[in-house]
Image (cartoon, coloured by chain):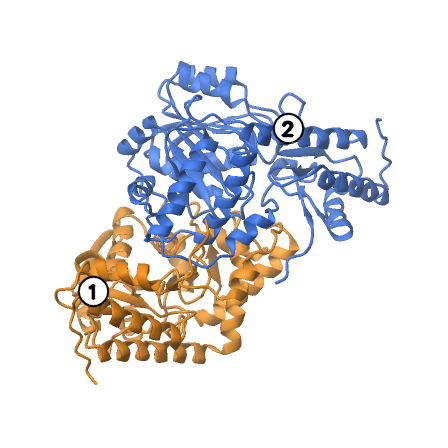
Chain colours: A blue, B orange
Amino acid sequence: MKAPQQNLRTPGPTPCPDEVLDGMSQQMINHRGPEFRQLIDGLTDKLSRIYMTSGKVYILTASGTGALEAAVVNTLSPDDKVLAVSIGYFGDRFADIARIYRTNVTKLEFEWGTPADPEVIRKALQDDPGIKAVLVTHNETSTGITNDLESIAKVVKGEFGKLLLVDAVSSLGCVPLNTDQWQCDVVSTASQKGLMVPPGLSFASVSDRGWEAYKESTMPRYYLDLGSAHRYLDRGQNPFTPNVALLYGLDVALDMMLDEGMESVYQRHHEIADFTRAGVQKLGLTLLADDAHASDTVTAINNPEGVDCGALVEMMRTEHSVVLAAGQGPLQGKIFRIGHMGLVTREDIQEVLNALETSLTKLGYQLVPSN
Amino acid sequence: MKAPQQNLRTPGPTPCPDEVLDGMSQQMINHRGPEFRQLIDGLTDKLSRIYMTSGKVYILTASGTGALEAAVVNTLSPDDKVLAVSIGYFGDRFADIARIYRTNVTKLEFEWGTPADPEVIRKALQDDPGIKAVLVTHNETSTGITNDLESIAKVVKGEFGKLLLVDAVSSLGCVPLNTDQWQCDVVSTASQKGLMVPPGLSFASVSDRGWEAYKESTMPRYYLDLGSAHRYLDRGQNPFTPNVALLYGLDVALDMMLDEGMESVYQRHHEIADFTRAGVQKLGLTLLADDAHASDTVTAINNPEGVDCGALVEMMRTEHSVVLAAGQGPLQGKIFRIGHMGLVTREDIQEVLNALETSLTKLGYQLVPSN
């Protein structure tokens, strides 16, 4: 099939730079040979720099959810007490994975559109000293909220010394995440967001404490076994035939990011997010998140009263080739979302804003610009 | 990194046609949108034709091993009695997965380099009526042996009505595998062999009987849950962000295969295998497999006496840019392997034979051509 020309502004997959797409389309190599070793050793090193960890980052041929499942099955055992902090759809997913693997999950839910409160997490850990691990979403894609992971980690690690498993799928490589300094035990992310590579790869770091938990864990695991990943990586390999093409693309993307400098990458994300939020508000629309917790990677916009959200998203796509995401779960029909992570320019966002203005007017909504 | 120009003759990953690599390098699309629905619906239909099934084929963003694990965790429960037929490294792997998920595995091993004997399987099923499922490798990549799956299925399904889970990673799309007629309950395969796509996608079909087993299965599963895959496929989606790039490539590859016609694809594999075996024997080398069971996708050659197998494979790569595979497990140092599935011409194989002749001579081995 021929892919359409679009302004793809879903919060993943995100558009890939031409250099990444070109890099990907090279011929295969032997995944047990010296060329592959060179590739994966280089990638591991670059990923560790972006993760800000002195440890290794393991590459899985899987979607981000595979790396979330890897965090659970490599560190926990059935009946382990788990505190699953959820502020939206992907927090719920992380909790579901832990529950399906028969850990004893206490879900700590915060209203969709608000961040997790470290105070409430402290209280929950005080109330149940038996809790072994805390699951946290760094950036909740479904609501456009970034949790204050550093403060949460200070409680979970600094005060209580619990295992901290982090879903960083829509944050890593876009906003700062200091894996080692914040003492995150497993940080899971994926290729198709800030890393600007097609979906199909995911990643997990494991702290020393995480490896201790691995040794005690009795979960069944084979394909997602990070111990195998570790052993094979020592000889420059993956346990299973890896996605060579996406690894080529990843190599290009990581070089682009590191060449730019991560501080600049973070700053760029912050500026484009500001530009998006200001532009949306200028149209007279309101944001789901308050400024203090609004995500630098995805913006959730409250659906203007009287507008059919589905019709708006559909009109944006069919008449303007702008692809937005609708709301998920309880926010279905109540919000729509603009992704602005990885490859995105002000022009891309301006195009979205212009198309929004035209579409909303056409749908009969009276815009009240705030300028 | 820049991929080298090589004659890649490992039994996977296999070289990809330029058309596939070009198709892959298109821009991303929304995996919850109508364009994706069109893509995955078309792919599902094409895969079903190649699988020879009226059922659906589910696409996983994972290596082949992920699809083997999916077969186990979606149909079995802990303590289920499983007969794991193994004729080599990948038969052992399938058994390991079942064991790790705490099924009660009886391993039925055949000497590496020989096929499974349906008579012996019949005996094993007679001896233990409690066996629920049989795991079989269709084509054993580590030894270059193709099991007579049709005869095995007649025993397992026709005579005993057991669940039949098939590893078809290095057979499907290369040699005939009639999923429905042979009553295979789950058939797992991957993208990087006969399907001529980079590694990173795997596939599983599920029979009606397989879905019955799914309902009874109590295994924990999330990322590899085929029930989720089924529900999402009904709306033209994957449960998790799928590998859009590889799906583009797969679409091109499946069209190429179906346009050629599967009978012609199978015949082509048979002819190139014959050509390979004849050429190797002409050099005075001997084959691990006898003619009746030699694989049409990979040929295992006995290491000539006195030759260091590792040095040979290394010399082939560094001096001739021909990439072969060494032996695995007990056959390490005893055989080397030439892959000839998917994209391969007589010229590619002739180049291998020429390089083999030169290298063996240089390594001091006295070739005794047979003609």
Mark 1 closeness class: few <14, some 14–19, many ≥20 residues within 10 Å: many
| Disc 1/disc 2 C-alpha distance (Å) | 57 Å
Q: List x then y, in percent, for residue B352.
A: 32, 70
As shown in the figure, which amino acid type bears the numbered disc 1?
A: Ile
Specify whether residue B340 is in view. yes
Task: State the residue at coordinates (48%, 37%).
Answer: A189
At a point 19% along the width and 62% down the height, the residue shown is B108
Write down the residue under mark 1.
B335
Q: What residue is disc 2 on?
A: A270
The single residue placed furthest to the left in the displayed view is B306
From the viewer's perspective, is A288 left or right of B143?
A: right
Q: Is residue B308 above or below residue A358?
A: below
Q: Numbered disc 2: what chain?
A: A
Q: Position of residue B315 (x, y in %)?
A: 27, 61
Q: Quadrant of residue B91?
A: bottom left
- Quarter the N terminus of chain A occupies: bottom right
Residue displayed at 69% across by 28% down: A274
